[in-house]
Every structure is written in structure tokens, then in C-alpha cells.
Image (tube, rainbow, N blue to C red):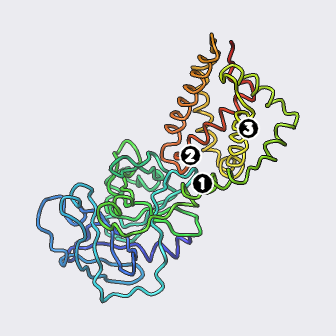
Amino acid sequence: MNELDVLPKTCVQIYQLDTYHGSGVLIEINNVFYVISVAHVLNYDEGKTIDIKNFSGTSEEYGKIEFGFLVGKHEDILKYDIAVIAVDVKHTFPYFPSIKLCEDIGFPGISLVFRGTQKSTALKPHSICPCKIDTSSNNEGIFCIEVPIGAYADMKGNTGASVMNGYSGSGVFIRETDDIYLVGISQNIDKDTFNGVNCRSISILKKYFLPDIEISEFRGGNTQLRLNVAEIKRNITKKMVEERKANNYGDIENLTRKMDAFIENWAPEDLDGFVNDILVWENIERTKIRNHSLYRDRIENAKAILASGNKNYQVGSIQQGNERFHKILDEFTKLLQEELDGTSIKSSSSVIAAGEVARLLADCTLNFKK
């Protein structure tokens, strides 16, 4: 995304008559233009009847924007502090960029930017970046971003709301991408002891205000990974499994020794299943994980937590070994889901767990004894 070109086209200052109230973001959805902001910018949180015609927007690129009507139910506007304002149909916006709506803020290493206007005599829009995710979205779509300290404080020693006041309602975008992804709306300063801004996820916009909008997934996200998993499983042939078993890695011998401890009367197909899990996971890791160290770190952390409680288990029978193995697999899947919460691969935790456990068995990391 070319921020210098895109953000001035989307950034809107919201006025009530001649008084500046806050920021907004101009977007086009299904050939209709809207200004998205927060309800308290319109004084909606005071419980008064709002005449949206008393408000208007000023765009850096397109000048004055007259408003048409508010979208959404009164209770949703209040609860989620979101204002979706339909722009008067008489307006046109030449060369307006195509913007994708995205809720995948958990992709490792992403950087965010929002552009708004401070409440000051200057009243000039500024871009705040680079911002990082501090907390993932909760059940009400609230997430927190950390902003650079230089944007959070001024030379006079003021911090927090006194400096960031006026940026409420700004659109939050993913930086440095080919496509333009709007992920949320900035709502308020977290607190003066932490340079963070609370934002509302774009998912709330779809759920309660504009249900027909399409949510895109960043760089393929969960959908692409699910497709890849299915495709990888289809492409792993019996020949590949047999080749892996024939190679002198030592892992097949280790696997069979462990299987003797927890699978009674196991068949060759059982061993093939473990090898298949390893091959699937190796492919995913090579293409999806190793390029993103934060994913790998979270997986390693889950393994460390698992290992801390599973160093050496004595089992008195094959049945006990089988039960213990499945319990460990379930524990590991749950740990991965917790560690990967907010990321685009959380839904594939069971696939990752199966591959990692098979690899752990092959590497003799989990020590079962009869």
C-alpha cells in the first residue's frame, strides 16, 4: 500500500457546523460510499437525538462531504460505539482506491497505520505509524494497538488523550501490502500509562451494520491454509510414504518402538498415518511457518509447556500407553489453540499438533516405557 497516495483519499475530518469533532474513514462498499467513524464523535453517547444533517465531512482529497443517513440500530450504535454514515449520493470520488475489509490482525509481524486529525489549531491530518498489535480482538471486536511514543507525547510533556484527541474514528490499515486492508476503527486512548489505542474490529461492522460486506483474509489467511492442507494431503502419495519409511532417518524405527507401547496389534496403515502427519506438517512448516518466526515461536512455546508436564511417563500396559498418548495429543492441541489465538492458523491446530507429536515420537522426545 502506498500510504502517501491512499490514506489522504480515505481520511475524513468530521464537523458539526464549524466545530471539529473527530476523524472518519471513507470507504466504498458495493458501489455505495460511507464514512465510518465512532458514535461519540457525533455526540451519540450522550443519548441525544442526532440530526446527521448537522454534521459533514471534509476530505483531504475530495473536499466537503455531505452526509445522508446513519446505518444501524440505535442500540448497536451505542453498544459498539460505531457510526456508519451513508454519504449523500450526489458525491463522486474519482480514482478512489479499492479497499478490502479484513479481520485477520493476528498475522505475525504485521504493522498498522491510522490517519486522523488532532484537535488543535493546526487541524492537519497525520498518519500514525508504525503501530503494532498489543492485544487480539475480544468477543466484542475490541483490540488494542501500540502507537509510537513520538505520536503519543508532545514536546510540552503532554501524553495520551491530550495529544491523540481528535484521532477517534480513524481507519486502521495494514501497512506495506500490495492490497489495501482496513482492519478496524480507532476508538479511544487506552490510558495515559500505556501508549495504546483501543480499536473496534471490522468484523463488528459486518455483524451489526453492513452484513453484505465481504471480509477478505490477509495473504490467504485461514481459507488458504485449509485449502493447502487439503491439497497437501491429496498430494502425499503412498510412494512418498514408502520412500520416507525406506530412508535411513532413524525416525521410523523410533516410531515403531513407540507404537509398540501404545497401540495394540498396530497395522502398517497406523505407521503410514504417522508418516503422513509428518509429511503434511513438514510441507506446511516449510511454506507457512518458517518464513514467520512468530508462528514458530508460539508453537515452540506450546511444546515447552507440554514437555514440562510430560517428561517421562511409565505405563503398565499397552492400553495405558494408548490412553496417555491420546491425552497428550489432546493437551497439545489445546495448548496450540491458546498460543495461536488471534492468528490465521489457529483453526489448523489439530493438524499442527498431529505433525509435531509424530515428529516428537520419531525423535524420541516423548519417552514412553512399558
In terms of depth relative to the viewer, which is nearer, 186 or 212? 212
> Are circles 2 and 1 on residues that touch, CB within 8 Å?
yes
The spot of residue 97 in percent (x, y) is: 49, 78
- Which numbered dot is residue 297? none
Where does label 3 land, which residue?
272
Which residue type does callout 3 highlight?
Answer: Asp
Which residue type does callout 1 highlight?
Answer: Leu
At a point 18% along the width and 77% down the height, the residue shown is 54
Where does label 2 land, which residue?
348
In this rendering, is residue 355 above or below 185? above
State which tag comes first along the sequence, 2 or 3. 3
In terms of depth relative to the viewer, which is nearer, 100 or 254? 254
The spot of residue 312 in percent (x, y) is: 65, 15
Q: Secondary structure at mark 3?
A: helix
The spot of residue 62 in percent (x, y) is: 39, 84
Where does label 1 land, which residue?
225
Alpha carbon distance from label 3 to label 1: 23 Å
Instruction: Quarter of the image for the C terminus: give it.
Output: top right
In this rendering, is residue 82 above or below 258? below
Q: Nearer the viewer, mark 2 or mark 3?
A: 3
Alpha carbon distance from label 2 to label 3: 21 Å
| Left or right of 322 on screen, residue 283 | right
Which residue type does callout 2 highlight?
Answer: Ser
Q: Secondary structure at mark 2?
A: helix
